[in-house]
Amino acid sequence: MSELETYRAKALAFLQSMAPKYAREARSGNTVEQDLALGREYMAAKHDAGFAGINWPVEIGGQGLTHLHKIAFDSEEMQFGMPVQFFGISLGMPVPILIHYCEDKDFVKERVRKALRGEEIWCQMFSEPSGGSDLAALRTKVEPDGNGWKMNGQKIWTSWAQYCDYGVIVTRSDPTVAKHKGLTYFWIDMKSKGVEVRPIKLAGGDSHVNEVFFDDVRVEDSQRLGAVGAGFAVSLHTLMIERYIATDSGGFGPHLDEFVKLANETELNGRPAIEDGRMRSAIARNHAMRAGLDSITRRAFAMMMAGMQPGPEGSLQKLVAVRSRQKLSELAMDMKGTESLAFDEHAYVKTDWGTSWLNAPTGRIAGGSDEVLLNTIAEKILGLPQDHRPDKGVPFNAIPA
Amino acid sequence: MSILYDEGQQAIATESRRVLDARMDKGRLLKLLEQVGEHDQPFWDTAVEQGWTALAIPEEHGGLGLGLTELGLVAQACGAATSGAPFLTGGYGLAQALVQGSDAALASEWLPRLASGEATGCVAFAEGNAALPPVSKVSFADGKLTGTKPAVAGGLKADLALVWADAAGEAALVVVELAKAERVAVASYDNTRLYADLTFTDTPATLIARGDSARTLARDVLARMAVVTAHEQVGGAEALLYIARDYAVTRKAFGQPIGAFQSIKHRIAEMYGLVEIARANCIHAAAQEGTDDFLLAAADARISATEAYDTNSRDCVQIHGGIGVTWELGLHLHMRRARSLAVEQGNLLFWEDLLVNELTGEKA
């Protein structure tokens, strides 16, 4: 067994020991608050067992292993349905950015420890009502205020902000230059005076995203991450940190085996649905697509182990997997007919087709919409031209609203 | 086997592409489309000279002893060039059957000749839309073969054929010398595939597998050829992706390159996605050669590669507009090849069923 396989086996043993208390079944029926409390407990247990901050430096409180170790742990953990959803963004982007840019190392160490143990949660505030895909169109502004800054404006789609202690934010510090040049990046205390968080109820019934309002919020200059005007570069750095993560070729919905099982158990036109050509075709096409994505993942992993940079084809994962999950969920519901009309809003997205269907649109929009991902593939990988951009090079305050 | 290409494999990929770039000629291929019964001899000479016929034949039979990964890389280069001779895949299928079959003397007689390119082979399994009919209409008895196999790729010129037949209610795999068969050329939209109806009338043939072992061997041979073809399809689909990309960055309309319009650039990005998914499946399938998972991996590769090549030929032509449908530009070489390869080695319908059967444990 290779060192990495040994590590994976160790991780699996730990997860199995945690499962009775924290995994999917133990969580069933929890309110969000109960689930969060359970999640915090699990994170502390994970920290105690040495599975927290796996690929972070030892001197900052991590385990000092490679990101391959982290992917190995994460892909095993994903199978269990542990209550980790509250901490994914926190530890995925904001805290690593703080580690990289914040100069007060004692402060950083304290935050890292508490974030890893689930005692504190960080959010990431990028999107605004006036710009999601077009990040640099943001309007939340900071103005010099004595030796610090004063912040006003609004962010939106901020995951778990209602439970967050801290956040990272990109703001406009200079409206007189081109839009991506006048941005500055900060960390802020979410309990600061003038910060107001309002949850947004989503189509699927849950409220994990929020609007966040800033009304004359005082920000110290020591909270700035990166230079004044370098906010766009720090934002891109934030988005690049998690470039290679544990993926799911099922698009974070049910496994294809669930569909095959349903088709085996369902009768259609007096025959088992599995004998229906439409179901067979859907199964075969989805299998081939998912097998391709899995093979891309394995190859990327093998390349990283060999010290090589994985190819850009990894960028296909979310685009291809989530939209096909959406269509497959519709077909599964058709197969169930009237039985599919009963809906349980607490059902698990990886085992329930209705929940998978209703929440799929979020997956196709969050973290880069299908259209933005296609643009990125076309421009960055294939060298196709950018769209016509009338705001290019124009000072932000001269762009027609 | 590793899913990362080693240096030797990378060299095969680069060298086969370089040789074909230098020697293939679109004008020559276009002319061949209008002739029934001719293949691209310069391509075949190249294949023999480069040792591609010997690649996947064991060393003790005069081959190079390499496998599906290496042959797949050559097939990918051939696909990119719409190169024109069907013997590469058919010869490989026949050779695999001889290696795994029960007649050692026959294997010793023919494998060295197939490896050296002195003899060519083809595989005659399909009848109509059945890639591997439950009961073949061609019958084998007392060392003799009778019946017709329709539109066999390479059948018009190959020296030797592997035939899926019925022996008194049992499946049979037999090898037959085609000099003794009646061959009628099929005028096709892809003539260099050398399709021919092969009619056998008490033609002497040699049995190499019977019953369940014939069924298992036939499926293995078909899956292996499907993986080679899937590589060829990926090569073609990838070539079309870059032809479309190159056109979209140079052709202008409404004051900008057409590639700046999202209707075009998104279409090309989708073409990229299809190629990469199919390529990943091909790499995986080639690496699974000889394992229990091979049939399923071959089905994944074949399905995604067929979808990629068909879709990319449709979309590449569409992105070109009017010039895309001209004879001279030759995109139809890919369109034609995408379809002929989609039908050879079992169509999508066959592989979809086979894949679901593998998942559910049913036997076809």
Image (tube, coloured by chain):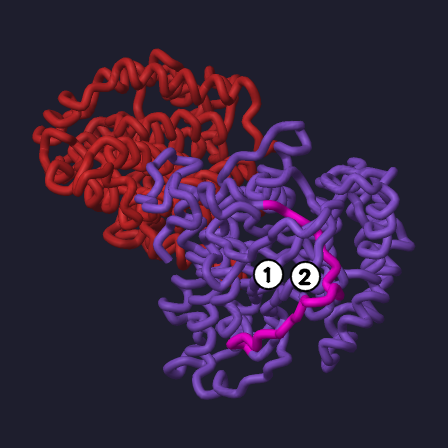
Chain colours: A purple, B red
Report the residue marked by disc 1.
A152
Q: Residue at x 18, y 23 (%)?
A: B26
Whole-Å distance between the Cαs marked 1 and 2? 7 Å
Tell me whether circle 1 and circle 2 mark residues in contact (CB < 8 Å).
Answer: yes
Q: Which residues are magenta?
A: A184-204
Please determine whether, in this image, residue A262 is positioned above or below residue A43: below
Q: Residues within 10 Å of mark 1 (few under 14, many from 20)?
A: some
The quadrant in which the N terminus of chain A is found is top right
Report the residue marked by disc 2.
A217
Please determine whether, in this image, residue A189 is positioned above or below residue A68: below
Chain ID, mark 1: A
* SS for dot 1: strand
Q: Nearer the viewer, residue A58 or A324?
A: A58
* SS for dot 2: strand
Where residue B356 sits in the image (x, y, percent)? 46, 60
Q: Nearer the viewer, residue B189 or A156?
A: A156
Q: Residues within 10 Å of mark 2 (few under 14, many from 20)?
A: some
Q: Decide whether residue A189 is among the magenta residues.
A: yes
Q: Nearer the viewer, residue B77 or A139?
A: A139
